[in-house]
Amino acid sequence: MEAAFSGKLPPIYKRNGRECYLDPIRKKLIYITPEETVRQRVILYLTDTLHVPIQEIISEQHLSHYGITSKKRADIVIHALDADQQSVPIAVIECKAPNVYLDMKAKEQMFEYCDLMGATYAMLTNGIDQYCFRYDAEKDEYISLTELPDYKGMLSDQYEEWNLGELPPRIPFNRLESYLKEDFSDREDDDYGDGISKLTPLSLAVPIFNLWEGLLDTRVKMPTGKYGLFELIEDYGVRMLSYGNAAGGKFFGPYRSFLVKVNENTEFFSIGVTTYCKSTSPDKVKTCIVVAHDDEKEAHHALQLVVEDNVAITGDKVNFYHSGKIAVGRQGSGKIDELRMFVEDRYPRIISGKRFFLGSIINDRLWRLDDPDVIELIENLISYSIVRDEYREYVKAKRN
């Protein structure tokens, strides 16, 4: 949702040759950064548009102020008096720089602050987009709002929910190719608008589009249960996420997320489709199926499967392979032969000659997450990614 605030900023002064804002909340000079500019615009929006008393706004507040054992800070907290005339937080606002993608991780950080402080309302913004929420105690979830209520509305709990509406029906199978060819023919972008490169041959682009549409269709859930090297606890639906890779690239957008148990640890694996190119060949844009892994250490792409290099069409079958190429963060590239040994030990069923075979689906229907062939592909993608990350840990330990 587009951010609704703009307008004048606080006076600008100089200190040590750097420009500063005179912050009306903290009553001190603050060096100007992109994030600080967003924060100052939000403060003015709160006071001028939402009529929040300035004395009820706290900026850059340590969570420890609320008796929470944490070194983290909330960007902006709005307070009000409770029934006992005690000042308590009612809203938390997180501000990011304009170039920062507002993904699910940023939202979850904000929700964590709200939960810890007991605040009801939340807003996340980068000055361009904004997302507003209210905690619904009966549903035990945060519901989306059209905007943050004004101060009186927050106190009286008057708000307007954002009606997301129903998902549109999927494109019929017999229209997938024409949809890619015709509906996006006027686009100047490098992709079809769905993370698929226009340079990808249609024979590959159509089934990948079919797969991607299936992953984005939250009306169909992958059944829970034991699969390969993991147990699926919950098909978590679609989340907006951003991930980096070993080469320093960033990938933003929707991912289908799965909450899984691996070796008694509960972690997220998420699958997406995006465009990809090497820095040395920026004009050669390819399509990539990516598997992201969120563990306690980091969030990263565990697998990047370049479609043009690893997907093959045989008759009406779409076969998914991987070469075994693997990067190990700052350690550089891993060895395919060593990775193969890990796969032979942990998940040998995907070994197919010199490659790893991840699944085969007949391209004669819309693919869904309750389709056995699609389920097998997801099972193998995640299990293979688990082995790849185990190998990465082995390499890092050996080289350190």
Image (cartoon, rainbow, N blue to C red):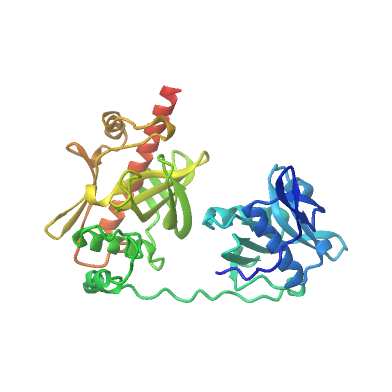
Residue drawn at point x = 72 percent, y = 54 percent: 117
View extreme (right): residue = 85
- Name the residue nearer the viewer: 293 or 374: 293
Is residue 120 at all visible to an observer of this figure? Answer: no
Q: In this view, does 169 lie above or below 73?
A: below
Q: In this view, does 388 lie above or below 168?
A: above
Q: Where is residue 22 in the image (x, y as percent from the top left)?
A: 78, 55
View extreme (front): residue = 17
Residue drawn at point x = 26 percent, y = 73 percent: 182
Is residue 184 at all visible to an observer of this figure? Answer: yes
Residue drawn at point x = 71 percent, y = 59 percent: 40
- Name the residue nearer the viewer: 55 or 346: 55
Q: In which quarter of the image is the N terminus?
A: bottom right
- Name the residue nearer the viewer: 44 or 391: 44
- Tell me which corner region of the image, top left, top right, bottom left or bottom right, holds residue 187: bottom left
Report the side of 327 relative to 315 (left or right): right
Report the side of 20 relative to 101 (left or right): right
Report the side of 195 relative to 313 (left or right): right
View extreme (left): residue = 315
Q: Where is residue 272 in the image (x, y as percent from the top left)?
A: 38, 55
Residue drawn at point x = 11 percent, y = 58 percent: 315
Q: Position of residue 36 (x, y in %)?
A: 67, 54
